[in-house]
Amino acid sequence: MAIIKVPAAETKYGFHDDYSEGAHPRVIEAMTRTNLIQQNSYGEDDYCNEARQAILSLIGLDPAGAGLGDERPSIPKIYFTPGGTGANLLAIASHLRPHEAIISAEPGHIVGKEGGAIEATGHKVISVPAEAGKLTPSAIHEGYETAVAFAFQPRPKMVFLSNATEIGTVYTRQELEAVARVCKDMGMMLLMDGARLGAALVSEKATAGGRDDQLSLEDIYRLTDVFWIGGTKNGVLLGEAIVIKDEVFGADFPWHMKQRGQLLAKSRVLGIHFSTLLQSQEEGEGDLLFWELARHANAAAKEMSNALVGMGFQLWAETDSNQVFVIFEKDLVEELEEQFNFFVWEKLENGGLVVRLLTSWATDLEQVRRFCRLVRAWKSKGEA
Amino acid sequence: MAIIKVPAAETKYGFHDDYSEGAHPRVIEAMTRTNLIQQNSYGEDDYCNEARQAILSLIGLDPAGAGLGDERPSIPKIYFTPGGTGANLLAIASHLRPHEAIISAEPGHIVGKEGGAIEATGHKVISVPAEAGKLTPSAIHEGYETAVAFAFQPRPKMVFLSNATEIGTVYTRQELEAVARVCKDMGMMLLMDGARLGAALVSEKATAGGRDDQLSLEDIYRLTDVFWIGGTKNGVLLGEAIVIKDEVFGADFPWHMKQRGQLLAKSRVLGIHFSTLLQSQEEGEGDLLFWELARHANAAAKEMSNALVGMGFQLWAETDSNQVFVIFEKDLVEELEEQFNFFVWEKLENGGLVVRLLTSWATDLEQVRRFCRLVRAWKSKGEA
Amino acid sequence: MAIIKVPAAETKYGFHDDYSEGAHPRVIEAMTRTNLIQQNSYGEDDYCNEARQAILSLIGLDPAGAGLGDERPSIPKIYFTPGGTGANLLAIASHLRPHEAIISAEPGHIVGKEGGAIEATGHKVISVPAEAGKLTPSAIHEGYETAVAFAFQPRPKMVFLSNATEIGTVYTRQELEAVARVCKDMGMMLLMDGARLGAALVSEKATAGGRDDQLSLEDIYRLTDVFWIGGTKNGVLLGEAIVIKDEVFGADFPWHMKQRGQLLAKSRVLGIHFSTLLQSQEEGEGDLLFWELARHANAAAKEMSNALVGMGFQLWAETDSNQVFVIFEKDLVEELEEQFNFFVWEKLENGGLVVRLLTSWATDLEQVRRFCRLVRAWKSKGEA
Amino acid sequence: MAIIKVPAAETKYGFHDDYSEGAHPRVIEAMTRTNLIQQNSYGEDDYCNEARQAILSLIGLDPAGAGLGDERPSIPKIYFTPGGTGANLLAIASHLRPHEAIISAEPGHIVGKEGGAIEATGHKVISVPAEAGKLTPSAIHEGYETAVAFAFQPRPKMVFLSNATEIGTVYTRQELEAVARVCKDMGMMLLMDGARLGAALVSEKATAGGRDDQLSLEDIYRLTDVFWIGGTKNGVLLGEAIVIKDEVFGADFPWHMKQRGQLLAKSRVLGIHFSTLLQSQEEGEGDLLFWELARHANAAAKEMSNALVGMGFQLWAETDSNQVFVIFEKDLVEELEEQFNFFVWEKLENGGLVVRLLTSWATDLEQVRRFCRLVRAWKSKGEA
């Protein structure tokens, strides 16, 4: 058997995605520490319950008594799935009837990034135009009207949005309030995909209006019917935490998880991941690891974004969180590809390439700077 | 946030299932060691490829060039899913057409233990009687004939079996050869659920006929169309490895994984788990960790089973692998439940209870002995 | 183009099924008479509404205002589908959530006669043993308990039965009351497949207890959550009428019909069929055509059944309605097959064949007698 | 029971759709004539076989031996379904694997007129822009490229088009050849929805290039993988005839029909409908009823369209077949609605309303003229 490769000095560094590394060392440490303690399976372990407590606190509810057996009314049910596609298909399939559909912005993850997972559960995804990657009340309204214009067509009953969006932009509290209002007015539920929720909530954009105006997990719980907090892209090996408001749908959820192959026997792993992520760095001191990691990712993206803009490059999308979308010329891209991994998102009419650069909790700032130096060198070479 | 509980001395010890602990320390160690090495996502990482090499070697094929991009004809494709229900629903949904059905023994996992996962993909599961938990050629034949007796009923196109079975029995090579023959004769594919394949293959039963006659992974690859090697129940945190013979179905498989929410972004975790599990204990020395762990589980079950039979208790099923099914009286069960966790499988007509006791790679033999002492004490008390 | 064949004298006569002919002449006549009158599509035509009125009257409700737009609370919604499999899959898919299952007797039509239609909508069908083709409260109870014995398995939420059953037996009012009671006690809905409901309700068996005790459409509406009245097997070209109690499921039903391809553009055909079937023979005089046709079918079966029993043949099932199941020897079957079409249902251990003989509204009693003469001749030949 | 209403003089006349009447009298006559002849069920009757013969002749193949049991290689299988949505969902679900998708023009019937029927079978419908309601090679190409740009997204494997399109336009032979070529080049199958195929093939547009260039059923069979001939909208009570090229998919088709509730017990009705529709008016004389009825529908639309254009109204779509799309002012629409039924398709920015006027085999030309007189009167009134 081949020996595990140690990364050679010349290995390319990756800004390809935010899941190239394993987990934050503290997550690994907690997992190791608790490894041999026997626990219940399928989400009824102590660690899942501790994570549930942490989430209840974060959304402003009493954590006491959290757990699968928690019978308190108006306390949401919380579950942990291995990944985001599973979280979305479960949230949708468990909340909709066969003839009901879901509205999503065109770049929505469920539209073109999840392998037809929603259609595979029998539901139509109605896509509408986005503004800066975000859903607008008018787009939702129009999508709904078009859908019901002909008799017996799939009835929109849920609205999907991602925060941060698929192009890294984030929702302000006002924007989310407006979306939630139109959903409520039209009798539709609201689902938030929080694969990058950490990055979204620590974004300067989300705090634009100042502290009082900052979008919080408490707001999100208040404004949505079901949402999930992404772990995979913010420091753990795997796992997303789903928060479900409806009592019946919430109670039935494990049946759906089992039916879709989304219920891990050793859910303890997801539990310990989230309970660690949602603890403060030093017992009781400092901010939650979850926020710290997201801040690091955003800061790395911002540094990169600012540097590139400073050199005169044009951004293809605002750098609100941990995704940088910049327009490069073909030969610059080729030169960069010799030393870095990243994703070419789109080819523009004028031949320019939209390059997507992702940063994460694990991003090495030195590599960000090396990347920028390389770009600067290429630019001055051209100007010479 | 609550502090992680350290197991107090009086905590009940569990024989409830074989996934109460985390992963074998060597698995944790490998994961920790490689944690910060950047890797490709979605199964294209180095560790998944190393695991693929290990599996190809085990089924008698040339490991060179293993990987998602492996274009060699007649080399199976190998993928890693988080859990067993996902592995089964994917194997079935990717191999059958909508009007095709799958035959399973009545106690088959897909019949009554996977939340209707197969039906949720649109396929009927035809259940037939089992003998000692195992499928027989005649049961398959009869199930097929009944299914096609009326026009346009779901056409059986695949046969499902678990090895070890859901009650811990295992197939001999002759038995599997016979089942494979009837499948071939009737134009049906054969799927083996290997959640406990390790325990099955190191079982004395599988080796009954002596070395030459031992059922091996090579045989299983030869006799089935698709099978999977269980990791979750044999030493890792999560993961099952699926081996697919058909070239077209094999190449399309990742699309199905994505569509069903079974494709982990950080598949590296599954890769490092399996590459460690399939390495020999000491680099190049001794047997594979996978076999060693299975042997420990079986040995613990055998010791417990022998002790109970020695005391005059009746087994409800043969102890071929790591599951002990024994018949206890109600008050013995109640006494045992004060100190141990286990599962009461069934209530018999005569009032006796069928108790299921599972052992695993992590089972503490001291606890097995303590359990037996408690039973013996109860028995002598009664005889006094 | 070949000329339509006129049945030659020597053509075999069929007792193969109860849908070998077209429609009763009065149905054809009504269709012809209204053929060129423009009507609304998709079930909003005058004839569907007239049929709805007729059905409401039959179940003891006020027919005034019947129609798709009928907003009266506690008035069931009524729809018309082309066939029975569509009626069943719609009734089930519109009433169950993805994780819910339906319990049926083993010989139930949805178990082995509808091509996996229910599984194709994602739901598991749990089959339980029948007594004389009928569901019993204890079988339902046991099926439920087994289904919920393991965590997160499909939760039984509906019970399916056919009246008349698939082997021609019928439910008495007491039997249906008992089944309905256990469903209610266990929180399950009850669905009745009425493909042969006419034959069931005019059966001597249903009226066994005398007039006051006769099972009526009013009882069926009271005791079930959703049921349908079969037209295809009782005098029309196609069509089944579904009666839905639940207000929400009833209102949503056309969306499901459209989604499953069960909503005919010219539903007027189904409307005129049922409005004619549910009219009295002579305007205002005599019984409904629906009952008359069913009585003819039952009488023909009874005459045949009595004759065969009189000759000493053994019935395989009671002749409660329009299906005769009798045990014949192989060579008698071969002789009969030269002049008649019928279905060989099963081969018995002792070599005897279970023959199914169906009669219908169109059965020619002369042919019934000719069939019996042939059997009698064969018998005396043997005795000679 | 209410008496069937005779249409009062003042009843509004309908141009709302092409299925407001029953069937052509010759269809009713044939059905009546054969009504009591016993036939096999589920599509194995003489009439379905005669219709199969007629269709084979029309696509240039030897009709001899047509029938369900027809084992000749390279002879397509032909089936009859009650309606168009069923025909489409069956054609798609029987030809695609779970991870495969279908491309359709945005106005395609499967996109927004079939209640999410395709998604309900698990498949994603990828919609692309249309030109005059028609698919173009470039739109197909772009739709394909976008779909496969991200890993593991639903793979386009089939292309859907309707001829005539949903807005009444039709494909020329050149256009269909071009679409078929791009499908072939990209490894996709081609499905043609022929709900209004009669109207499309007798359209002046289809014959634009003169006889040698006319698009024929023979061409359609040659250029598509599966297509269906619409009966419901061209003279029968119900029924569409599906022609399937692939031998395996063709042979399996009845299983899919049964599973989706699309297989009528009395398929004889569909058989006699199509065998009559595909016979010449007088035995052996004149053109097929199918073509004659379509010509009447188109002629009525053309007369209406020409008259409206003559008055200076603007068409919203070309009147290639039996659908007239014209732009009217709101108050004209209100005046017309007092005497006619029709569908308001869309509201334009400028306040104008797009009105859809459908003609059919049954359209009364006098009513067409009365409609035009009313429009003319309104116009002159305005000009006065």
Image (tube, coloured by chain):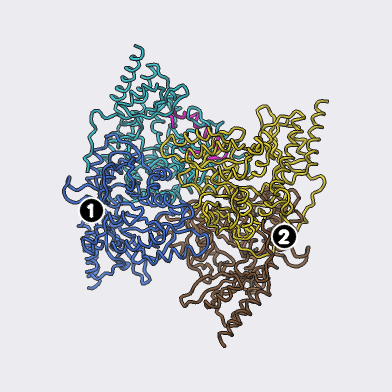
Chain colours: A blue, B cyan, C yellow, D brown
Q: Bounds of the magenta span?
A: B166-191
Residue D220 located within the stretch drawn in magenta: no
Mark 1 residue crowding within 10 angstroms, few (<14) / some (14–19) / many (20+): many
Residue that protrudes farthest toward the bottom in the picture: D384
Under mark 2, the amino acid is Thr
Q: Nearer the viewer, residue C140 or C98?
A: C140
Under mark 1, the amino acid is Trp
Residue indicated by mark 1: A291
- For the C terminus of chain C, give its image quadrant: top right
Report the chain holding disc 1: A
Tell me the residue at 67%/72% (across/down): D211
Residue indicated by mark 2: C32
Tell me the residue at 64%/38% (across/down): C212
Taking B128 as reference, is D279 left or right?
right
Instruction: Give coordinates of residue D20: x percent, y percent.
Output: 64, 64
Instruction: Give coordinates of residue B376: x percent, y percent.
Output: 33, 17
Residue C232 versus residue D25 in the image, above or below? above
Element type at mark 2 = helix
Q: Is there any visible trace of residue B97 in the rendered image?
A: no
Q: Nearer the viewer, residue B76 or D292?
A: D292
